[in-house]
Amino acid sequence: MKLLLTSSGITNKTIHNALVELMGKPVAEANALFVPTGVYPFQYGQRYAWNPIGGEAASRMCQLGWKSIGILEPSILPSIDKNNWLPALKEADALLVWGGDPIFINYWMKESGLTDLLPTLPNLVYVGTSAGSITTASTFAETYAADRSCAGIPLRSEEIVLSSVNGETSRTLLVANGMGFTEFAIIPHFENKDHFDASATNAEKWASRVPVPVYAIDEDTAIKVDGNTVEVVSEGQWKLFNPGKTTNR
């Protein structure tokens, strides 16, 4: 398995070219599966799940011109005979994992067996968007404005004070185990005015709580992982925090 980790999907030509390179074929010849799971815990999550599929989201992940595209829903896989869904996954060139709650995504990826299965698929490209990128780490952190009310248990929780245009704002920061596909963590939406928690100042504070290197990436940046090679592909802004930290598994 290879990875292309983004904040908002395939937003520019540089990231698009990285996707094509990882797949080894153009999008028009590639099969994709879309994972909407992460948005279900949110109010109106059903609508948020439909938006990218229906072309109503800013990210056009599902509208890139795939040869075929389908939905893979990890939360229902334990109740289905594996022989009924595994062939489509094995034929997929890209797995498009949407955003939402990364702890919830991680929970269902493990419960469904996908966490163990995906690394055995050498030709698959895991394409993460926002929380879909966050959850690939061995250890990650995420900020929350309200209490979680869904599956998945973090390692620890703390109140953290972040800077915003309206002054200091308190958020809950949760640190959790991820799927362990990478030895670094992701902070998406770097320096995005709609995500004040990911400003440069706040991202540094956020990253200090995680025991691994952390890439803060904006909407025009992706992290490309092929084997042991990690490459930043970008037409925007990014920053690496904690470069000397290592993970002890």
Image (cartoon, rainbow, N blue to C red):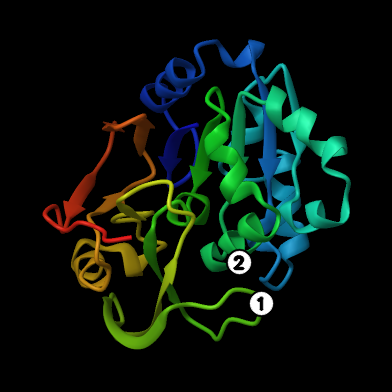
Q: Percent from the top left, x then y, of residue 46? A: 77, 61
Amino acid carrying label 2: it is Phe
Tell me which residue sits at (66%, 20%) in the image: 65
Asked whether 59 or 217 is in front, the reply is: 217
The answer to whether residue 151 is above or below residue 130 is below
The amino acid type, in three-letter code, at marker 1 is: Cys
Dot 1 and dot 2 residues touching (CB under 8 Å): yes
* Residue 24 as seen in the image, left or right of residue 204: right
Quadrant assignment, res 149: bottom right
Does 91 sit left or right of 158 as displayed?
right
Indicate whether 141 appears above or below 159: above
Can you identify the residue that label 2 sits on? 104
Q: Quadrant of residue 174?
A: bottom left
Residue at screen point 68% across, 51% down = 36
- x then y, percent, for residue 14: 36, 23
The answer to whether 127 is drawn above or below residue 87 in the figure is below
